[in-house]
C-alpha cells in the first residue's frame, strides 16, 4: 500500500507501520543509500533521522522509522497526484493532445531543401552562447541546441516533449521528472543521457550565463531516478520552474571534459542534438548551419514535424545597417527584417521587388509591446531622482520624432506590457491590482496607485509646453537654468552621456532630434558612439548614463522577470536590469505572478508589476510595431496559419521552407 494513506489523520496509525510497510521502507532506504542518490528534502530528513537514532538496532529501528516516515510525509504532503504527460502548461492543460501531428503553425508537408541567408549587424568571437564572456551570433542559442521540452508559440506558455518523451509534476509542482526519449542522440551519434542532463544543469547554473543561475538556486536536489529519468526538486514555491527547467539547452558532457566552460572562443564547435550543426564559419564574418540528415528526431518527434525545413542557414555579419541593406538589395541576403516603417514604404521598391523576386510580407502578432527606447541608469547620481527622469521623458518629443522617423505615426509604447491584457490600465489602480500594491504605498512613486500617463507633446519641433514642464521638474529636483545651463546650488552643471552602438542608423536619428531639445534645456550632453564589442562590454558592466534598450515581453511572464528587474540582477553584470531597478514592490509582484493560484491573480500581479516599472520612469519609450515587416526571396515560404506570437523565436527560419 502507498505510504501516504498510512499517515492520514491523527491516530497512532500515523506513527506505526505494518511488517510489510517496514520491509518496503527499509528496502527503499537501503537502495537510496547504496546507490548514492541525491536526496530531496525528505531524503535529507531520512538521513538525519537514521544518523540521530543509530543504525539497525532492535530498539532504535522503530524510532527511526517513525521519524523517517514522518519526514517523508511532511516532505510529500500536498504534493498531489502525478503521472507522465506529453506536455505541460503554466495554467490548466496544454492545448495540443498527446497525438498531435505538428505545431499548429507548422506545415507538416513542407518540402526539405534550399537555404536562407540572414544579415546581422556587428561581429562575433565565440560559438558558446551559454556564458557571459564573448560575442555570439544570437540565433545559435536556439538553432544549434535542443532542450528537454519545446515551446508552442501559439499558446501563452505550453511545452511539449522534445528530448524528453514525457514530463511528470505533482499538483504543487514541488518537483519535476523528465523521461528522455530512447532515440535521442547528439550529432556525433552518441545517446543523450541522464548524466548529460545533470552535468548541463549544474554547469549552466554555476558557470554559465547569469540568466541560468536564478533557477538553479531554486533546485534543492537533482537525481537520476531511472535509466532515462531525471528528477529536480525545488526548495521554494515556483509554479513556473518545471517549465523553465524544461527549456534548458542540453550539452554533451564529454565534449567539455578537461576544458574551461567559462572561456569563450571559436575553437569548440558544439556537438548538439538539434536538427542543425555548425558546418562552416569565419569569426566576425559568417556562420553556416547545415541540416543534419541523420537528425535523431526525424519522424520521431511530433514537435519537429514541419520545422527545420531548410538545408542551410547562413548568417552574414556587417558593420552597419546600411551595408546590410545594400547586401540584401544586391542578392547576397535572401531575407531582411525591417523595423523602420518609412524605409519599408520608401526604399523597398528596388528592381527585385518590382519583378516579384523579392516579396514583402506583413506578419501580425498578439504579444505585448515590450519596452524599447532610451534607458536611464538610476545608479548614476544625477539620474537617481525620479523627477529628473520624468523631466527627460517629458523633453522627448515623441509625436514629432514618430512622424519624422516613420512617415506615418506608429502606436506608442505606453508601458512594459502595453498592447495586451497584461498591460496596466489607465486611471487609478483598482481591485486586486490595488490590493497587491497598497502594502508598498510608501515606496511607490507618484502615479502607481493614482494613475499615470506619458506626457503628450504638441507635435511641433519646438515642443515648448513640454520643455517648460521639463524645466519645472528639473527645478523641483534642484537644477535651475542659469546662464544657459542647468545648475545646482553649488554651481555644478547637469549633464550625462548617451552611449550608442555604431551601425544603429534609426537610433542615431532619434537621438539627433532628442539631443537638440536637451541642449535647449541647458543639459550638458555628450553622445558617444562605440563599436559593438565595446557597447556590449560597457552595457554588461552598466557603464553608461543613458543608452538604447529593448526588451521583449511575452504573454507568460515568469522567472525571467527576476533577471530583468530584481535587486540581485541590479548587482549582476550581464543582467538585463540596465536601469538599476531596486524595488521591494517589483520583487513582490514577481513573486505573486510566479505563485498565483488562478489566471485572474496572475493577470492582476502582472498589471501591478507593469505599474511599478512604468511609474519608475526608467525608460523613454518609443513606438511598437503591431506587425513585423519581412522582405524575402520569393522561394522562401511560410505557413498561412500564423502563431499568436507572430514573427518571434520559432518562426523564421524554424517553420519556413524553400520552394521554387
Image (spheres, helix red, strand yellow):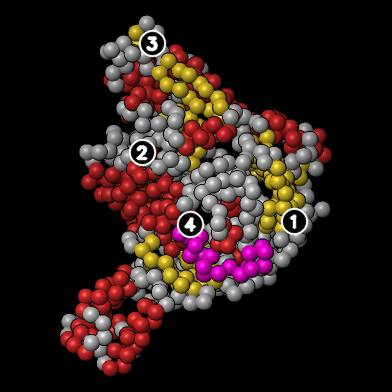
Contact, mark 1 vs mark 2 (Cβ under 8 Å) = no
Q: Nearer the viewer, mark 4 or mark 1?
A: 4
Horizontal side of 495 relative to 587 (left or right) equals right
Q: Is residue 13 above or below residue 151?
A: below
Q: Residues within 10 Å of mark 1 (few under 14, many from 20)?
A: some
Disc on the earlier residue, 4 or 2: 4
User: Mark 4 — residue?
Assistant: 203
Q: Quadrant of residue 323?
A: top right
Q: Nearer the viewer, mark 4 or mark 2?
A: 4
User: Mark 1 — residue?
Assistant: 311
Spatial CA span between label 1 and label 2: 44 Å
User: Magenta span has 202?
Assistant: yes
Horizontal side of 464 relative to 95 (left or right) equals left
Residue at (70%, 46%) from the top-left corner?
A: 281
Q: Residues within 10 Å of mark 3 (few under 14, many from 20)?
A: many
Q: Dot 4: what SS?
A: helix
Q: Dot 3: what SS?
A: strand
Q: Is residue 25 above or below residue 313?
A: below
Q: Residues within 10 Å of mark 4 (few under 14, many from 20)?
A: many
Spatial CA span between label 4 and label 3: 52 Å
User: Mark 2 — residue?
Assistant: 581
Over which residues does the magenta segment extend?
A: 185-203
Which dot marks residue 485? 3
Amino acid at each position: 500500500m502507498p505510504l501516504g494513506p498510512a499517515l492520514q489523520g491523527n491516530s497512532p496509525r500515523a506513527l506505526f507501520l505494518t511488517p510489510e510497510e517496514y520491509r518496503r521502507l527499509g528496502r527503499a532506504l537501503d537502495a537510496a543509500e547504496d546507490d548514492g542518490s541525491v536526496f530531496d528534502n525528505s531524503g535529507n530528513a531520512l538521513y538525519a533521522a537514521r544518523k540521530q537514532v543509530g543504525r539497525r538496532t532492535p530498539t532504535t529501528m522503530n524510532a527511526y522509522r517513525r521519524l523517517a516516515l514522518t519526514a517523508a510525509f511532511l516532505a510529500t504532503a500536498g504534493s498531489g497526484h502525478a503521472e507522465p504527460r506529453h506536455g505541460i502548461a503554466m495554467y490548466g492543460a496544454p492545448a495540443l493532445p498527446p497525438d498531435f501531428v505538428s505545431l499548429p503553425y507548422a506545415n507538416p508537408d513542407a518540402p526539405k531543401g534550399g537555404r536562407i541567408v540572414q544579415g546581422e549587424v556587428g561581429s562575433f568571437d565565440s560559438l558558446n552562447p551559454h556564458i557571459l564572456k564573448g560575442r555570439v551570433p544570437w540565433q545559435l542559442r536556439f538553432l544549434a541546441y535542443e532542450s528537454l521540452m519545446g515551446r508552442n508559440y501559439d499558446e501563452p506558455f505550453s511545452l511539449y516533449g522534445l528530448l524528453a518523451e514525457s514530463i511528470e509534476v505533482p499538483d504543487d509542482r514541488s518537483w519535476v521528472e523528465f523521461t528522455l526519449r530512447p532515440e535521442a542522440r547528439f550529432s556525433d551519434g552518441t545517446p543523450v543521457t541522464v548524466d548529460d542532463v545533470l552535468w548541463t544543469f549544474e554547469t549552466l547554473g554555476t558557470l554559465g550565463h547569469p540568466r541560468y543561475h536564478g533557477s538553479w538556486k531554486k533546485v534543492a536536489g537533482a537525481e537520476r531516478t531511472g535509466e532515462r529519468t531525471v528528477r529536480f526538486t525545488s526548495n521554494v514555491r515556483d509554479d513556473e520552474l518545471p517549465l523553465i527547467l524544461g527549456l534548458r539547452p542540453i550539452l554533451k558532457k564529454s565534449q567539455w571534459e578537461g576544458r574551461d566552460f567559462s572561456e569563450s572562443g571559436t575553437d569548440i564547435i558544439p556537438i548538439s542534438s538539434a536538427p542543425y550543426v555548425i558546418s562552416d564559419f569565419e569569426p566576425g564574418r559568417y556562420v553556416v548551419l547545415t541540416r543534419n540528415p541523420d537528425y535523431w528526431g526525424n519522424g520521431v518527434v511530433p514537435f519537429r514535424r514541419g520545422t527545420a525545413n531548410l538545408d542551410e542557414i547562413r548568417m552574414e555579419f556587417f558593420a552597419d545597417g546600411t551595408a546590410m541593406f545594400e547586401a540584401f538589395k544586391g542578392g547576397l541576403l535572401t531575407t531582411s527584417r525591417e523595423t523602420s516603417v518609412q524605409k519599408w514604404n520608401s526604399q523597398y521598391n528596388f528592381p527585385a521587388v518590382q519583378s516579384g523576386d523579392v516579396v514583402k510580407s506583413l506578419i501580425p502578432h498578439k504579444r505585448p509591446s515590450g519596452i524599447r527606447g532610451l534607458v536611464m541608469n538610476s545608479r548614476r547620481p544625477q539620474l537617481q531622482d525620479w523627477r529628473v527622469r520624468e523631466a527627460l521623458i517629458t523633453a522627448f518629443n515623441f509625436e514629432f520624432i514618430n512622424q519624422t522617423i516613420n512617415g506615418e505615426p506608429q502606436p506608442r509604447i505606453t508601458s512594459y506590457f502595453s498592447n495586451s491584457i497584461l498591460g496596466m490600465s489607465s486611471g487609478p489602480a483598482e481591485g486586486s491590482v490595488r490590493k497587491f500594491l497598497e502594502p508598498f504605498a510608501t515606496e511607490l512613486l507618484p502615479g502607481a496607485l493614482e494613475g499615470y500617463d506619458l506626457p503628450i507633446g504638441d507635435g511641433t519641433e519646438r515642443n515648448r509646453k513640454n520643455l517648460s514642464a521639463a524645466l519645472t521638474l528639473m527645478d523641483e529636483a534642484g537644477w535651475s537654468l542659469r546662464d544657459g545651463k542647468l545648475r545646482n546650488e553649488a554651481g555644478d552643471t547637469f549633464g550625462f552621456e548617451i552611449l550608442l552602438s555604431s551601425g544603429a542608423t534609426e537610433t542615431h536619428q532619434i537621438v539627433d532630434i532628442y539631443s537638440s531639445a536637451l541642449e535647449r534645456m541647458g543639459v550638458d550632453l555628450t553622445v558617444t558612439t562605440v563599436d559593438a564589442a565595446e557597447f556590449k562590454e560597457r552595457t554588461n558592466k552598466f557603464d553608461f548614463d543613458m543608452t538604447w534598450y529593448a526588451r521583449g515581453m511575452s504573454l507568460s511572464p515568469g522567472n525571467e522577470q527576476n533577471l530583468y528587474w530584481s535587486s540581485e540582477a541590479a548587482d549582476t553584470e550581464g543582467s538585463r536590469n540596465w536601469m538599476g531597478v531596486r524595488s521591494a514592490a517589483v520583487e513582490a509582484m514577481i513573486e505573486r505572478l510566479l505563485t498565483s493560484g488562478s489566471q485572474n491573480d496572475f493577470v492582476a500581479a502582472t498589471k501591478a508589476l507593469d505599474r511599478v516599472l512604468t511609474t519608475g520612469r526608467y525608460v523613454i519609450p518609443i513606438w511598437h510595431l503591431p506587425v513585423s515587416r519581412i522582405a524575402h526571396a520569393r522561394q522562401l515560404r511560410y505557413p498561412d496559419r500564423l502563431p499568436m506570437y507572430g514573427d518571434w523565436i520559432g518562426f523564421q527560419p524554424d517553420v519556413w521552407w524553400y520552394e521554387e
